[in-house]
Image (spheres, rainbow, N blue to C red):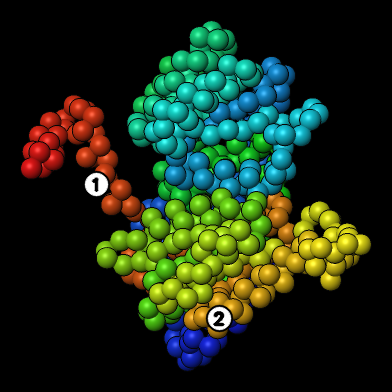
Amino acid sequence: MLKVDLGGCSSFVKDAEYQEYVDKALAALDVLENETGAGNDFLGWKHLPSRTPDSLIADCEAIRDSWKGKGVDLVVVIGIGGSYLGAKCAIEALSHSFAKQLSGKKDAPEIVFAGHNLSEEYMAELLDLMKERNVAAVVISKSGTTTEPAVAFRLVKQFIEERYGAAEAAERIVAVTDAHKGALKSLATQEGYRTFVIEDNVGGRFSVLTPVGILPIVLAGFDMRSMLKGAAEMEEKTAEKSRTNPAVEYAAMRNLLYGKGKKVEILVSYNPKLQYLGEWWKQLYGESEGKDGKGIFPASVSFTTDLHSMGQYIQEGERMLMETVVTVEKSSRSVTIANDPQNLDGLNFLTGKHVEECNAMAELGTKLAHIDGGVPQLSVSVEKIDEYNLGALFYFFEKACGISAYILGVNPFNQPGVEAYKKNMFALLGKPGYEEQAKAIHERLSK
């Protein structure tokens, strides 16, 4: 079971202060559970783990089996933001680090992602790869008009249709979109694509446990039932009106530290498999809390690698930082360090130790050093990296995010600020309806 440890913050806060923020967190939890707060029409994610029907997973497995029968060995998953990061995080965490390089027959297709950038090189190189592989695609978008995935899907769709024909393309493309409206829903109906629904009451950054995440994760060959089980247990645990509710503890402490000037929170992992957990977490907290001139800035690092780049700043830079360390208690593999008779590197004192033991001591040593350097340490620990524990992490951070944003006094479920750059981009690209804005921008740039 996931655990939160706030011992690394004890020298930075008084217990009475913390208890005051626990009271605030419990009040925020009450608002979240009773669905009386801002954005309460976007709370469909709360009960996804316990209410997702097994038939949904079975439908995803049927697509996986159908594509396997066609010899599909490459699935292009098209999406951006919440329509991309959750699935990417899960697949990166659960996959063999060198799956692409290993020889032998693969049990599942390779999953690659598109539509999360506007790089011409990336898209051209993806098309190069597709030419050599047996391809299918999943396109994920509520509207179907978000620029990055819409551009990517237009190109991928054209490729699949030209290679396989329109009828077979309809068997190789699945859309995850709105139930009734939007450009992608209309196109899917017109072309005869199989569709899965993104419910109106679930925002993108909270959608990893919907078909947005479930379908790609199942296609990659992982156990979605176990992931939902881990999330469901966390759903139950984080609903408790208890001062030891882990989501309450985490939300309370990070807000207390924010009030003490810790404006930047760094999510730390000591396993490179969790790098994309940091990317997913940054969107979740950045979009949920960063508004109305408020919000903790979310950053992420992968230690020990980034100790050799960011370690100096974290230790001695401006004291605006706190760290949340995701600790994995057990490695799934076993590698011990051999003895070297020459001992030229001076490492024979490590003979017989597991590599993970060295990693754990690096984690503990870094924690102590950073506390001494003025950086509070929040810890979130799980037993190991697997579907069950990843599901627990996903749900824990989602629930804590809702609580934390309500403590902060902002709507966790909107993102009005993301429209500003889009309006400028559309004007500069000549989108109809943006003529006046384009004129104003060009006048501004000419000065």
Image quarter in which the N terminus is found: bottom right
Image quarter in which the C terminus is found: top left
Q: Which residue is mark 1?
A: 420
Rate crowding at label 1 as few (under 14), some (14 to 19) or many (20 or more) other CA atoms within 10 Å: few
Q: Quadrant of residue 28?
A: bottom left
Q: Position of residue 316 (x, y in %)?
A: 47, 76
In the image, 397 versus 73, the foreground residue is 73
Q: How many marks?
A: 2
- Identity of the residue drawn at 39% across and 71% down: 263
- Identity of the residue drawn at 49% across and 81% down: 374
112 displayed left or right of 177:
right
Give the secondary structure at mark 1. helix
Q: Position of residue 313 (x, y in %)?
A: 47, 69
Q: Give the Cα distance between marks 2 and 1.
A: 39 Å
Is residue 171 visible in the rendered structure shown here?
A: no
| Residue type (three-letter) at the residue carrying disc 2 | Ile
347 displayed left or right of 423:
right
Q: Position of residue 72 (x, y in %)?
A: 67, 21
- Identity of the residue drawn at 10% across and 38% down: 446
From what the image shows, is residue 216 above or below residue 230? above
Is residue 127 visible in the rendered structure shown here?
A: yes
In the image, 104 versus 137, the foreground residue is 104
| Residue type (three-letter) at the residue carrying disc 1 | Ala
Sequence-wise first label, 2 or 1: 2
- Identity of the residue drawn at 45% across and 37% down: 116
Q: Which residue is mark 2?
A: 371
Q: Position of residue 74 (x, y in %)?
A: 63, 26
Closest to the camera, between mark 2 and mark 1, is 2
Give the secondary structure at mark 2. helix
